[in-house]
Amino acid sequence: MFNHDSSIWRNWRNQFGLIPSISLPKGNITIPFLTILHTSFVRCIAFSPDGNQIVSCCGNEPGQVWNAKTGEQLGELQGRFTGVMAVAFSPDGNQIVSGSIDKSLRVWDAKIGERLKVLQGHTGVVFSVAFSPDGNQIVSGSRDKSVRVWNAETGEQLRKLRGHSGTVKSVAFSPDGNQIVSGSYDKSVRVWNARMGEQLRELQGHTHEVNSVAFSPDGKLIVSGSDDKSVRVWDAKMGGQLKELQGHTDEVNSVVFSPDGNQIVSGSQDRSVQVWNAKQLSELKEHPGGVNSVAFSPDDNQIACGSYNKSVWVWDNKIGEQLNGHTGMVDSVAFSPDGKQIVSGSTKGSVRVWNAKMGEQLKELQKHTGQVTSVTFSPDGNQIVFGSTDESVWVWNAKTDEQLKELQGHTHEIYSVAFSHDGKLIVSGSYDKSVRMWDAMMGKQLKELQGHTDGVKSVAFSPDGNKIVSGSHDKSVRVWDAKMGKQLKKLQGHSKMVNSVAFSPDGKQIVSGSDDKSVLVWNAETGEQSRELQGHSRAVLSVAFSPDGNQIVSGSFDKSVRVWNAKIGEQLRELQGHSNAVNSVAFSPDGKQIVSGSNDGSVRVWDNLNLDTPWKIQDDGWILSSTERLVWVPSTIQNVLRCPHNRLTLSRQGSAIISFAQHKLGTSWHECHNLSVLQFTSSRDCSQAFV
């Protein structure tokens, strides 16, 4: 259903006689770049060995093979299907094996979809199948409590492995093909000699049914997921539990290692896909439905998951890293000047430095007794300065991790520190109501700026170093002459305490965020308020300008990070993923990334893409541009469209890519759209998918 009162769609219909399906532009990195729609919930998926194809199965429909890059359907597995529960490619990618409710295994030609053979012997539903690394054997797990090994060429049953007292839900070969691991409803994980069929060890620890198991690529580790909501990692040789990964809030349905062994991905009934570092949690990605099956592409770059919401989602695994390591709330984050590193400070007194590209922790500076409330790099990247609740400002050598100096003078907690752009000065703001300026080399206090009547929460230098801006619990923003130490202006407009302030790159504007839920932009010269950015539902805790001055980023107690057009004040995108208040946000030096720190203990890095036209889908299904209703979509498709990262929408009626990057409202057709951004990938009328 479209808003026929909209001039946009009226002109569209008059020109083309059709109404297209819609795919929102990319923006939020915690959502998929490709969505494949099924008519029933997706039970199982698998990547081909070269990563170019995906096979997915749902209900009694034929299994379908897709192009993993474009989402184009390449073919179907032919024949009558009865509830396919598992699917896997052979190592050479030429065959596909499936396990079914009808107790059989079927082997298919992956190129033409022709059924090659049927393997029979199980007396219960087949829940899991896998090829051996050499492709000569197939292993299967069943409700009949057995694990069976088959000759992949002849279909002959070679071995029957008995020992589980409950349904065998998952099976996998070790990378060398010498062992098999199985997970069962009897709560155990068992390891078997693949050639002899003997049980080597039993791994106990899960308190509920085990739904999924997998070997690491080097064969040294085993991962398992269970109804007890946990993901567990085991020593494959000794059988001991190495770690228990907690984070899911419902049963874990599927687990797998990345091809390099550095990550584990898990899919859960709690509607999330979580990506874990082998040592700690790495990233959380939200999903609109319970996740049944997950898989890594062979190059580590993509993750596919199949869901109860009748879709296959493909994720980019290389953007949106979540950096975990802090045990307390993250109060402050900042990029290094070259954009290669991130520094973060925690309420537990730790300062950590991260590789911004890989997400790896590079170092942790010596812990402090106080909370670290503010951190930043010096302009040359050689020093790190941070403020603490222990009333001191600390300066460290970023290269050697050596503590260089402690700046003392404040009489209360310090909540903000910043370098001047030449690196010669440091400014700090404290709950003692003062702003203090320091000689960065000598560590001596140069000036104390007095005027605020309550604690100072945020401070920043202007780009030329001549001014300082400060925000306070007294609800005011103040501008100071950095050389004279005198107050130049008092900016009033916020109705509650000001938590964050920043200058624009040209020094002509100031942005501030407040407990009153607003982001205000000021003329730095006149002190006049130029615009108000509204959208956050709770206190705004941090704000920053992009390096080109065209965007503003804000973090809020409402758990969101929002990006705004700095010129007109419209919201460009909302980045969701944090599970608690966002205390600190910053742009990378090239403006291509955003980093955020949260009370949830994580630091997240977001891909920042230019979206010149903000538009969103409401809970009732209407897509809005500004305040105008453009198009309504039914509930069956809303979850897909609610993901701004999704560029391609597919259905049995066709597929389309539509970008509104150059869209604007107008009275005539040529004012509203640039036709070059519309691409149909099917000759069929794609509007049938939604109308």
Image (spheres, rainbow, N blue to C red):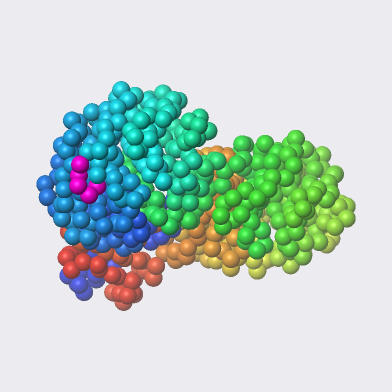
Residue at the far front in the pictured view:
196
Residue 234 horizontal/vertical position (percent): 48, 34
Residue 427 horizontal/vertical position (percent): 77, 53
Q: Quadrant of the N terminus?
A: bottom left
Which span of residues is magenta-colored? Answer: 152-156
Q: Can see residue 244?
A: no
- In percent of the image, x 48 and y 56: which residue is there? 319
Residue 161 horizontal/vertical position (percent): 30, 31
- In percent of the image, x 54 and y 59: which residue is there? 593
* Left or right of 296 in this view: 499: right
Nearest the camera: 200 or 623?
200
* Left or right of 215 in this view: 290: left
Residue 239 horizontal/vertical position (percent): 48, 31
Nearest the camera: 180 or 542?
180
Q: In this view, does 304 lie above or below 5?
A: above
* Magenta segment includes 92: no
- In percent of the image, x 66 and y 58: which residue is there? 336
Q: Is residue 102 above or below residue 303?
A: above
* Secondary structure predominantly adopted by residues drawn in magenta: loop
Residue at the far left in the pictured view:
80
Q: In which quarter of the image is the C terminus?
A: bottom left
- In percent of the image, x 44 and y 64: which residue is there? 611
Q: In this view, does 383 lie above or below 16?
A: above
